[in-house]
Image (tube, rainbow, N blue to C red):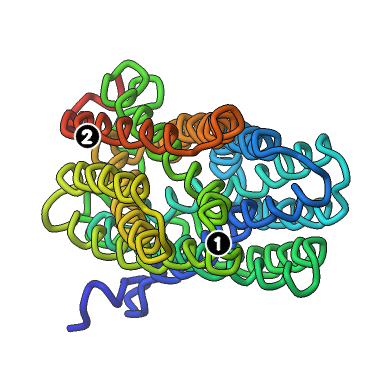
Amino acid sequence: MQSEELTAVKAGKARMFYGYIIVSAGFFLLAVIWGTSLSYGIFFDSWIQAFGWNRAELSGAASINNIVLGVFFITTAKLCERFPPKIIIAATGVVLALGFYLLSYTQTLWQLYLFYGVIVALGMSAYIVTLSIVARWFNKRRGLVTGIVFSGMSAGTMILPPVTSQIISTYGWQSAMLILAIIALVIMIAASQFIKREPKDMGLKPYGSNETEVHHGAASGISMKQALRTGQFWIVCALYFIFVFCQIIIMVHVVIHAIGLGVSPGASSLILFVYGLVGIIGVNAVGLAADRFGNKICFTAGFALTVVAFLILIFARSMPTLYLFAGVFGLAWGGTQVLFSPVVAELFGLRAHSVILASAGFAGCAGAAIGPFAAGYIFDVGGSYYPAFILSACLAAGAALMALMLRPIVTLNSNR
């Protein structure tokens, strides 16, 4: 008898479970979405030299990007409920490529804000939808497969920023933007064609489901309206806010912070390489651990490890300690980020999973909007990032305590 992991039954014939194709497509989608967009900080030094913009102004574009992204998270999730997801995701890939193409012609600050802040944000909005679709295909091992998908985000973060830095040093920042546009267009359109909303669209059932779940699993849980009335929803939103607040400060400012410590631009960009490499280990190890030990324990540990990472960064003065920070922060990031989708499924069920997750993601985008701008402003006023790092450590400590308060509420009557 073939294992449940490798087969599904359709019309009496055994075949490879299509959910793993979804996972593979999700890997490449997240690699492109985040690998290209998180290369943004690599362009800071070039733009400061070319246009004289300060760090708060450059961070402002990232803040707009994250506010707009939060709105588009919800809009794209709703569109994918009405239309085939592969069409919507392919369309976001076209828009993402367009954003980077236009950025190659940027000459003014308002263009930067429009092209990166709005157009690129729309192109990134398939992120939450991809995670929600993966959750619908797996009832068991949801943490593990979500970790595999998030490995794409780590791989993109590990590869594209250093490659972008090399292209900038060799051919200039405009050429780097054009190459990012081509990568986004080709890979996102190709990967999106393998996406199916849920198993029943192919006459299949989710991995690990029973017969009742085959018919009712997709509708189990509570509605968005019911979720809004629960304290658990607002805790998840607060956790998402803090998590992304801390993450984006690092992604936008850590390279130029390292340069300020006397590290070369090339060596500084490798901080993101280490972060992405260790993040791959984190998302897979913690996804597997969460399936065995529970989401809440691993969720809490991820935020606690974030505190440790910021303490290392505060005292880091050399490349070895900066790389140590990147490793710890990558592990903390992977161990936290991978659990948001499974946690939402565990707390609220799958009935409104994509919209609830997208709404929590909007809170995260608010954190991403405030974080990099606040850190840039703090530096411009005081000449140091350290107050921003201390604030992030304190917020992460509070998040670890809030994660302990999470309780499933899916026993509520979903038809109420």
Tell me the residue that label 2 is attached to.
Answer: 403
* Residue drawn where x is 59% and y is 69% of the image: 266
Image check: 121 left or right of 196? right
Q: How many marks?
A: 2
* Residue drawn where x is 56% and y is 35% of the image: 383
Q: Amino acid at mark 2?
A: Ala
**Inter-mark Cα distance, 2 to 1:** 28 Å
- Residue 17's place in the image compared with 329, above or below, is below
Quadrant for the C terminus, please.
Answer: top left
Dot 2 or dot 1: first in sequence order is: 1
Query: The residue tagged with tag 1: helix, strand or loop?
Result: helix
182 or 227: which is nearer to us? 182
Query: The residue tagged with tag 2: helix, strand or loop?
Result: helix
- Residue 265's place in the image compared with 6, above or below, is above
Spot occupied by residue 387 in the image (x, y as percentages of width and height): 42, 32
Disc sitting over residue 346 in the figure: none
Tell me the residue that label 1 is attached to.
Answer: 29
* Residue drawn where x is 30% and y is 52% of the image: 332
Give yes or no for contact between labels 2 and 1 (Cβ–Cβ under 8 Å): no
